[in-house]
């Protein structure tokens, strides 16, 4: 049987043969006591890449977000973030359950809000109000459509945050998609945040892990939470080796994913019963909307699965296709053709 064309997410990549070899050959030690040499190398490299003092290896991006919020905030403190943010929708209520934080959603454009919007949302110090403590930004903004925050916007956010003594956290699940698309150094984006992490399991194509970076003092606090939540590991160098391999081989190629996303979008834009904005396709995601016909987004997603194309429905009207390491030009052409065929059948 042929493999389906899996545009469901960039998390669905298979580790390559060369990555598996790097993992098999990794020298390892006890990560929990700081003596896994491969984990240490990965953390040093990412800290350096992001221009931060220190970094720590964690099992997932979700744990990076949740620990960072718990370190920045005391119970009752407030986090400001876009209304589409991963911490609001996909982390099991973690900010409330773990940090005890309350979240005020901001109405950004495609996941990006302005420094003016931020300034308006910051509460005056008052015993009636939660204490606004942290701003969180997603680079790229996932439910925003894979949007890249412009560097100037992030710099303005940082200035406003400083003026009000707020910390800035950057969810960099797809930070390298942003650096490649905008041709901005990772450290330049990261300089706008006090804490920042990158996911190894998205565009980088690793099977596991994420790395959270910040000041030495911040990372000391992170280690408490890592231990507390059971995120301290043993011979984790096997996993970190995949990350080191990906830093060398899977960053520049993200440009191919972006090209394929644009190609897919170009193939979908003129189809009947669909709506999408070509200029919203900034990185490796293509969001499109079903605007009529007999199928809603869920039905279209199910019908596509029957054609060997996996594209997730986000709700009744919207679908999201994500390009990645295992998707080639011919795959996106085939996917667009399948959507077109189903459209003709629906007409
Ligand atoms: C995937 C993702 C996360 C969570 O990362 P995991 O490694 O899947 O836990 C957080 N934020 C954003 C924007 C993501 O896309």
Image (cartoon, rainbow, N blue to C red):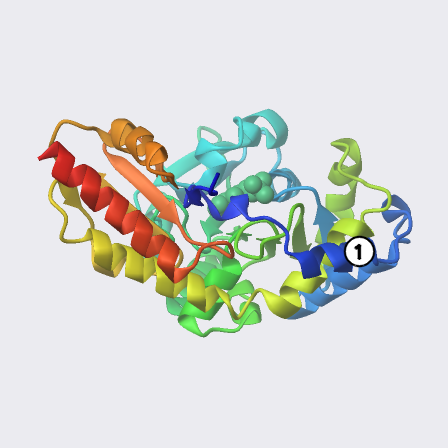
How many numbered marks have been drawn onto this rendered protein structure? 1
Residue at 65% from the left image edge and 40% from the top image edge: 67
Image coords of residue 149 (percent x, y)? 39, 60
Q: Quadrant of the C terminus?
A: top left
| Residue 22 visible, this orientation | yes
The furthest residue to the left: 347
Left or right, 272 with reference to 88: left
Question: Does any portion of residue 214 appear in the rendered image?
Answer: no
In the depicted view, which residue is nearer to us: 241 or 299? 299
SS at badge 1: helix
Q: Residue 243's x, y, as percent?
A: 68, 57
Q: Is residue 105 above or below residue 41?
A: above
Q: Position of residue 21 (x, y in %)?
A: 76, 58
**Image x and y of residue 28, in percent:** 88, 53
Closest to the observer: 201 or 82?
Answer: 201
Question: Which residue corresponds to mark 1?
Answer: 39
């Amino acid at each position: 049987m042929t493999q389906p064309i899996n545009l469901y997410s960039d998390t669905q990549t298979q580790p390559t043969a060369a990555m598996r070899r790097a993992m098999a050959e990794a020298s390892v030690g006890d990560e929990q006591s700081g003596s896994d040499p491969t984990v240490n190398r990965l953390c040093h490299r990412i800290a350096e890449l992001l221009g931060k003092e220190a970094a720590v290896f964690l099992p997932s991006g979700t744990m990076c977000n949740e620990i960072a919020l718990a370190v920045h905030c005391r119970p009752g403190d407030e986090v400001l973030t876009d209304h589409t943010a991963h911490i609001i929708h996909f982390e099991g209520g973690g900010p409330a359950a773990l940090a005890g934080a309350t979240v005020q959603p901001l109405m950004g454009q495609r996941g990006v809000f302005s420094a003016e919007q931020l300034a308006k949302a910051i509460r005056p110090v008052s015993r009636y109000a939660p204490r606004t403590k942290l701003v969180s930004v997603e680079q790229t903004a996932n439910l925003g459509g894979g949007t890249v925050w412009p560097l100037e916007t992030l710099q303005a956010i940082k200035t406003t945050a400083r003026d009000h003594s707020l910390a800035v956290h950057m969810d960099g699940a797809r930070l390298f998609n942003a650096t490649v698309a905008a041709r901005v150094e990772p450290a330049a984006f990261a300089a706008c945040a006090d804490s920042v992490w990158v996911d190894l399991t998205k565009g980088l194509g690793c099977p596991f892990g994420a790395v959270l970076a910040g000041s030495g003092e911040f990372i000391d606090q992170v280690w408490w939470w890592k231990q507390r939540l059971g995120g301290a590991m043993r011979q984790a160098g096997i996993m970190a080796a995949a990350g080191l391999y990906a830093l060398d081989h899977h960053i520049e190629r993200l440009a191919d994913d972006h090209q394929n996303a644009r190609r897919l979008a170009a193939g979908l834009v003129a189809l009947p019963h669909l709506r999408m904005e070509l200029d919203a396709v900034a990185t490796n995601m293509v969001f499109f909307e079903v605007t009529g016909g007999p199928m809603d987004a869920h039905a279209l997603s199910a019908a596509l699965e029957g054609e060997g194309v996996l594209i997730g429905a986000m709700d009744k009207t919207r679908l999201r296709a994500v390009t990645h390491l295992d998707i080639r030009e011919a795959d996106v052409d085939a996917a667009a053709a399948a959507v077109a065929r189903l459209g003709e059948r629906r007409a």
